[in-house]
Image (cartoon, helix red, strand yellow):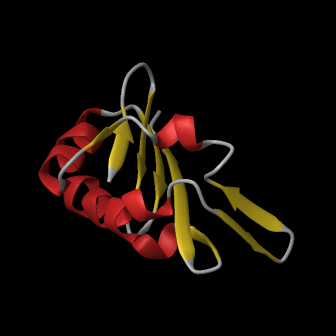
Amino acid sequence: MHARAGGRVTALCDALLLGKVFEQGGRTLDLKTYRAFYEGRKVSEKEAVELIKEAESLNLVGKKSLAAAKKAVGVEASAAKRVKGVPHLQVYRV
């Protein structure tokens, strides 16, 4: 997974998805144009869990990223929207 943490948003994306574009039914998940948003440093699942626990808001893409969120804060993968089977979820804490 790649993570970009800081400020208000922590973004996690499964490494194999970076640089790809997924389109389905008028929805686009563009990880090519927005690669820099997600591509911070490569992190382990353990590190991802800690980043998620500290985050104010989350932007998660991919099965591994969502699995880390489930471990960290109980987020269910079923809450994610999917484009071509790739889960994408935004979580805002108020």
Extreme residue toward the right, this view: 26
Extreme residue toward the top, this view: 7
Q: Is 94 on the left or on the right of 75, as rendered? A: right
Rendered position, 38 above or below 21: above
Rendered position, 55 above or below 89: above
Q: Quadrant of residue 23?
A: bottom right
How many marks are shown on the rendered structure? Answer: 0
Rendered position, 7 above or below 38: above
- The image position of residue 64, as x and y in percent, is 32, 66
Question: Which of 84 and 53 lies nearest the eye of the viewer?
Answer: 84
Extreme residue toward the left, this view: 46
Viewer can see residue 4:
yes
Q: Residue at x 42, y 64 (%)?
A: 16
Q: Residue at x 33, y 34 (%)?
A: 55
- The image position of residue 10, as x and y in percent, is 40, 36
- The image position of residue 20, as x and y in percent, is 61, 61
Q: Quadrant of residue 83?
A: bottom right
Q: Is 21 on the left or on the right of 11, as rendered? A: right
Q: Is 90 on the left or on the right of 63, as rendered? A: right
Q: Residue at x 37, y 63 (%)?
A: 66
Q: Residue at x 86, y 70 (%)?
A: 26
> Can you say which quadrant of the picture contains the N terminus?
bottom left
- The image position of residue 15, as x and y in percent, is 38, 57
Viewer can see residue 14:
no
Rendered position, 67 above or below 18: below
